[in-house]
């Protein structure tokens, strides 16, 4: 398997490709770095450029300070990866529903304001409203527009 993100199993072998260019590059980098302390869960043969994954990694050998309790709570706790993502209407306890609204825009507070202003309607193709056809910024027929030529 030639994937950088491949998960290793116990006793898996790691090696540098047998191509001359890859071998030469690996040996050159080894010579530049000098003798490097290999973690106890790995074996590395500097001559043959072959390694072996023997055991799980110990958190003290990572090279940076790792607080395992923090990571576990961060990814598995109440604010973890599988948390419920709920948005609330500002100042209330009413959640903004994640329902199919007939193809219309969800009524979040910023979407409501943008609909009133005529901004943020950046849909493309057939979903783009006619007031924005050929326009870069503002719609042509903005009902909330005020100015010297608009009668209020």
Image (cartoon, rainbow, N blue to C red):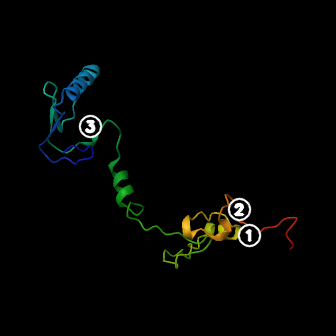
Front residue (pair 12, 3): 3
Taking 135 as reference, is 93 above or below it?
below
Circle 3 sits in a helix, a strand or a loop, which is it?
helix
Circle 2 sits in a helix, a strand or a loop, which is it?
loop
Q: Spot the residue most to the bottom.
A: 102
> Where residue 11 sits: x, y (%)?
11, 43
Kindly identify which residue carries mark 3: 61
* Pointer 2 with pointer 1, Cβ within 8 A: yes
Quadrant where the C terminus sits is: bottom right
Which tag is nearer the camera, tag 1 or tag 3?
1
Q: Who comes first in sequence, dot 1 or dot 3?
A: 3
> Where residue 145 sits: x, y (%)?
78, 68
Quadrant where the N terminus sits is: top left
The crowd level at tag 1 (other Cα within 10 Å; few <14, some 14-19, many 20+) is some
> Where residue 120 sits: x, y (%)?
63, 63
Kindly identify which residue carries mark 1: 142
> Where residue 115 sits: x, y (%)?
66, 70
């Amino acid at each position: 398997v030639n994937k950088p993100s491949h998960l290793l199993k116990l006793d898996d072998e790691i090696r540098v490709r047998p191509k001359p260019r890859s071998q030469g590059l690996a040996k050159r980098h080894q010579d530049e770095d000098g003798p490097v302390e290999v973690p106890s869960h790995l074996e590395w043969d500097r001559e043959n450029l072959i390694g072996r994954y023997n055991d799980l990694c110990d958190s003290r050998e990572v090279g940076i300070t790792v607080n395992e309790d923090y990571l576990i709570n961060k990814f598995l706790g109440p604010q973890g990866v599988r948390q419920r993502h709920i948005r609330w209407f500002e100042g209330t306890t009413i959640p903004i529903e994640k329902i199919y609204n007939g193809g219309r825009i969800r009524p979040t507070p910023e979407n409501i304001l943008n609909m009133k202003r005529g901004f943020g309607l950046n849909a493309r193709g057939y979903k783009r409203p006619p007031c924005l056809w050929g326009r870069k910024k503002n719609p042509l027929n903005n009902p909330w527009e005020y100015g010297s030529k608009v009668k209020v």
